[in-house]
Image: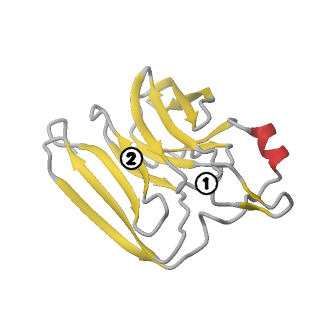
Amino acid sequence: QTPQRFIKKLYLIIDNNPSPVAAVFEFPGDRAWHSIATRIRVNAYTDVRAVVELSNGEIYMTGNFVKASGGCSAPALKDPAAAAAQLGRMKLILPPEDGADDLLLARLMVRHPNSSGLQFDQISRNFIPADYVQSIEVSYKGAPLYKVATDISISENPSITFGFIPDPGDATLVARVTDSQGRQFEQRFPVASSP
């Protein structure tokens, strides 16, 4: 990527999911990045696609067929009361300083049940209402790093790993999360990088 030609948007699409557009990532283009990863729900055998839109309007797509099913209607792994107590808590996992290269793989984890509205409560015999993360905005040193609009196709307790080259010295990474119920969560993380 160059300042003149960079990935502006990345669409993560799961063809056979009830909500096929799992995430739309947006990048400001003023910082080089290397990779991005997240966890998804897959409801039935399907193609999973990544579509990128470049700053010059070009569009590229890649995809893979995935054999998995039931992810959108699978019950939550945690007890609802325990999940509610942890709601909105965030953690940033940074690799140990090894000096191998300048790339920083920052993994942001958000505690949220990400209920799809398709999960069935075996005790109440009702569907659990949809309650999921809708957006995550991450900034570094006061400037936007990326933002992502998400949907029910992102897994419980969303996690995004973003590889970028940080500036030397100490800085702050800020994560802001908004969910479908209008709740907002924010957390600041110190990020140190060798000069």
Asked if one can make out residue 182 in the rendered structure from this viewpoint, the answer is: yes
Circle 1 or circle 2, nearest the eye: 1
Can you give x and y, in whole percent of width and height, for residue 13 in the image? 39, 60
Q: Is residue 131 above or below residue 47?
A: above
Q: Quadrant of residue 7?
A: top left
Q: Position of residue 101 (x, y in %)?
A: 42, 47
Give neighbour class at mark 1: few <14, some 14-19, many 20+ (Cα, 10 Å): many
Q: Decide: is 11 above or below 91.
A: below
- Residue at 54% in and 69% down: 43
Residue 195: horizontal and vertical position, in percent? 43, 29
Quadrant for residue 142, please give it. Answer: top left
Identify which residue is drawn at 84% across, 44% down.
Answer: 81
**Depth check, front residue: 146 or 178:** 178
Marks 1 and 2, Cα distance to the nearest angstrom?
18 Å
Q: In the drawing, does residue 82 fall left or right of residue 49?
A: right
State the SS at label 2.
strand
* Disc nearer the start of the sequence (1/2): 2
The residue beneath circle 2 is: 24
What colour-coding does the image apply? secondary structure
Q: Which residue is mark 1?
A: 116
Q: Position of residue 136 (x, y in %)?
A: 50, 37
- Using the rendered image of the protein, determine whether residue 104 is visible from the camera's viewpoint: no
Seen at 14% across and 51% down, the residue is 58
Disc 1, SS: loop
Most foreground residue, 107 or 41: 41
Instruction: Tell me the kind of residue under disc 2.
Output: Val
Q: Which residue is located at x 59 percent, y 56 percent?
A: 155
